[in-house]
Image (cartoon, rainbow, N blue to C red):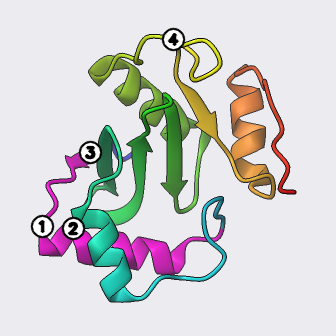
Amino acid sequence: MTIKLHYENIIPNQKQIDDLYKLLLEREFSISHHTIPTKEEHQKFVINFPYLAWYIIRKGNDLCGSVYIQNDNSIGINFNKLTLEDVEDIISFIKANHKPLNAIKSVRRGEFLINVPSNNEELIVILHQLKKKEIQKTFIL
């Protein structure tokens, strides 16, 4: 029997800040930082709520990840022990509860896209299995 995912909207409150920090400490892959921020830096970041939408994900009572949507319609999935079913559920949840912002030429696409760290082979394989189209590779200069 598959355990259903539960999505908790980030308010943020202190428990959510602590849960997100715990997830950050456990995270294996990252696009935006190379060193873990301090607890204080993390708290300030969460309180500033930099995303259009942001959720903590639980599986049963277990804290297992987070997902957010940015102003460029990109989705960030941070999840421990991904399965194809979990990724399908996350995508379905986002699409059922949010609409992408309108396209702006040279700024953003008019549909959701998922940013994936290039070394997160597990998520890349799952997205290919789900027949999601790869559209870009990004390089640091």
**Distance in Å between CA atoms under marks 3 and 4:** 27 Å
* Residue 13 highlighted magenta (yes or no): yes
Q: Earlier in the sequence, mark 3 or mark 1?
A: 3
Provide the residue span drawn in magenta.
5-28
**Dots 1 and 2: beta carbons under 8 Å?**
yes
**Dots 3 and 2: beta carbons under 8 Å?**
no
What residue is at 38 percent from the left and 28 percent from the top? 94
Q: Residues within 10 Å of mark 2 (few under 14, many from 20)?
A: some
Between marks 3 and 1 in the image, the one whose residue lies nearer the viewer: 1
Between marks 2 and 4 in the image, the one whose residue lies nearer the viewer: 4
Left or right: residue 60 versus residue 24 is left
- For mark 2, give the secondary structure: helix
What residue is at 66 percent from the left and 76 percent from the top? 34
Between marks 1 and 4 in the image, the one whose residue lies nearer the viewer: 4
Q: Earlier in the sequence, mark 2 or mark 4?
A: 2
Residue 62 locus on image (x, y percent): 32, 66
- For mark 1, give the secondary structure: loop
Q: Mark 1 = which residue? A: 13
Nearest to the observer: residue 61 or residue 67 = 67
Amino acid carrying label 2: it is Gln
**Dots 2 and 4: beta carbons under 8 Å?**
no
Indicate the quadrant containing the N terminus: top left, top right, bottom left or bottom right: top left
**Distance in Å between CA atoms under marks 3 and 1:** 15 Å
